[in-house]
Amino acid sequence: MPQQGRRPHASAGRAGSSGRRRPAPARVASPPSPRRTRVELTFLGGLGDVLADEVREVLAVDPRPVPGRDDALVVDLPGDRLAQVRRLRTAVAAFVVLHHDVPRPKSLLSGEHLQRIVDAAYASLRVAGSSTFRFEAAGADSAVFARLGDELARATGLKHDATDGELVVKVRRGARRDERTDPGWDVLVRVGPRPLSARSWRVADFPGAANATIAAAMVRLAGVRDEDRVLNLMCGSGTLLVERLLAGGAAGAVGIDLDEHALAASRENLEAAGLTRQVTLVRADALDPSVWPTGPATEPADLVLADPPWGTLHGSHADARAVHAGLLRAAHAASAPGARLVVLTHEVKVMEAAVREAAALWRAHPPVRVYAKGHHPRIWLLDRAG
């Protein structure tokens, strides 16, 4: 090998005048690949396929199911790309995953295992800072976890707050591979102090507001096109509008609601998202296009979004049939040929009947069932029939 600081002769590797072959120049080794980080992504039941498609698009990797779970996918990412998971809008949360072949959590206190947990905590902190942490585990209030909390606090400088800690550290049994092998323990460190589903733009709460990850899934199911004119009927506090416009450009966007309190909440959330200038809010009966003021609201829409009221928050079950039937008629009257309509509804039977009765107006895709905090709403994607 050439000595450091000396350049190989120009004819190195070829026979010289003496006939002796000079040594070939040393081959430069390629830099090592960045260390890969295993990340678990949780989702609301029913939205796994939607999240998988988003992962392929945003992270450019193929996700895999988590053994024994029906609400999570796992991916392996280069360590320097961990922050990209925060771009996912249909995931509930992201966790760095560590598997430890140990018989009990007490073994996590040993140097090698503890150091891996500390490294995962620092990886999360580099993405988004936290000042406190907490454990989510069976026996989280035990002496073992108290000691583990002390060690983790000493190594990271974070405060162990068992109730309100921001950085969540989960400890759970690993997936059993066979009956003879101990499954070990998994440690999961959440990426960031808040779940991915917690939106910074949501500054105005409103009863019955759509879940933001469900809204993001609705947007992905409909498709994002820059030339779309977007109409949100019964817009409420603006969740569907915000998620659609954060997903991509649009030719225009209009939100219609009769409730002034809802429109006020929409204005606050749109302002927090930096989208105020892109949206026109109109106070009017969303089910009666004939009373809408002339302007953006009366331009034919390419994409119609709706989250009709349910329960007793903003209506009643008795009104649901008329509301859903009126929604399909109004969306058809206000939309352009080829338009798409996406509806989130908890009134399953009512919507099924309304879709059958409006078959001449809309062609329906099979609905997507979502599991969200004890509720099972459906997402309906419909194409304008005429």
Image (spheres, grey):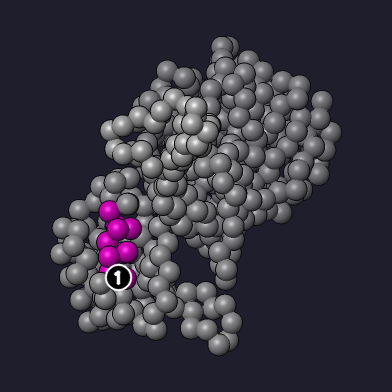
- x%, y% of residue 326? 68, 35
- Residue type, label 1: Glu
Q: Is residue 162 left or right of residue 89?
A: left
Q: Residue at x 47, y 36 (%)?
A: 22
Residue 316 visible somewhere in the drawing: no
**Up/down of 150 relative to 379, above or below:** below
Side of 329 relative to 206 (left or right): right
Q: Residue at x 41, y 22 (%)?
A: 276
Q: Residue furthest bottom?
A: 180
In the rendered structure, does residue 119 fall within the stretch colored magenta? yes
Type of secondary structure dominating the magenta stretch:
helix
Is residue 364 or residue 316 the one in the foreground? 364
The residue segment tinted magenta is 112-122
How many labels sit on residues? Answer: 1
Residue found at the very far right of the displayed protein: 360
* Quadrant (top left/top right/bottom left/bottom right) for the C terminus: top right
User: Can you say whether 147 is above or below 154 in the image?
Assistant: below
Asked whether 212 falls inside the magenta stretch, the response is no
Give the residue pinned by disc 1.
Answer: 112
